[in-house]
Image (spheres, rainbow, N blue to C red):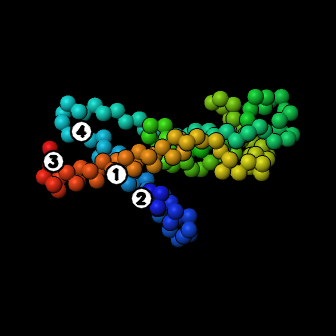
Amino acid sequence: MIVLMYQLAATSSHVRSWIPKLTLAVLIVAIGLAASPREAAAARIPVIYQSGQDSFLCGPLPSPYDQEPGLADFRAGYVCEITGVFWTYFSVRDCKPAAIHGDTYKDSPELAVAIQAKYPESTMQRGLWNHYGWMLMAALFVLGLILWIKDALAGKAD
């Protein structure tokens, strides 16, 4: 279902504006339902939720910044606002180009323009789980919900 929504969004420009919001809302409700305990003993279900900033590398710094001593060991990338669960981000937004080294970054305007010219946002290295893991989690939740509803309708509910 999530994949179909994204395929629809890719082909229809007027749909693009509400698909991410709908997907986020569905995911938040799904996680809330999945994490809500049915018994008092089950009240300690850990859910790892992330929000804030994260950096995604793209490659080496463009010339002439790769020769600057103050930027030694820095790499080109993007610093973005993220929201996610279990180390998979369902929202990556407000990305800005920067020189990144560990937990520090430099984003002077000239450097940002040079990085953006060489590396578009689509070149960010996110990894499969980080990029698509939330879709797998949402699909598993929907499958579980369908099976639960099926059992409830058949009279096999708890």
Q: Secondary structure at mark 3?
A: loop
- Residue 37: numbered disc: 4
Asked where in the image residue 103 lies, by quadrant, the reply is top right
On the rendered structure, is 142 left or right of 41?
Answer: right
The residue at which mark 2 appears reads as 1
Please state which of residues 62 and 134 is positioned toward the viewer in this rendering. Answer: 134
Pointer 2 or 1: first along the chain? 2
Considering depth in this image, is 56 or 70 the residue closer to the camera? Answer: 56
Amino acid on which disc 3 is placed = Ala
Per the image, the residue denoted by label 3 is 157
Estimate the spatial distance between the alpha carbons at disc 4 and disc 1, rounded to whole Å: 18 Å
Element on which disc 4 rests:
loop
The image's mark for residue 142 is 1
Gap in Å between the C-alphas at discs 3 and 4? Answer: 16 Å
Q: Mark 2 and 1 residues: CB-CB less than 8 Å, in contact?
A: yes
Q: Secondary structure at mark 2?
A: loop
Kindly report the distance in space between the C-alpha atoms of the residues bearing marks 2 and 1. 9 Å
In primary-sequence order, the first of circles 1 and 3 is 1
How dense is the environment of label 3, judged by Cα within 10 Å: few (below 14), some, or many (20 and up)? few
What amino acid type should be assigned to the residue bearing mark 4? Pro
Cα–Cα span, label 2 and label 3:
25 Å
Q: Quadrant of residue 104?
A: top right
User: Measured from the top left, where is residue 54 in percent x and y?
Assistant: 58, 38
Q: Are marks 2 and 4 in contact (CB under 8 Å)?
A: no
Q: Is residue 48 above or below residue 149?
A: above
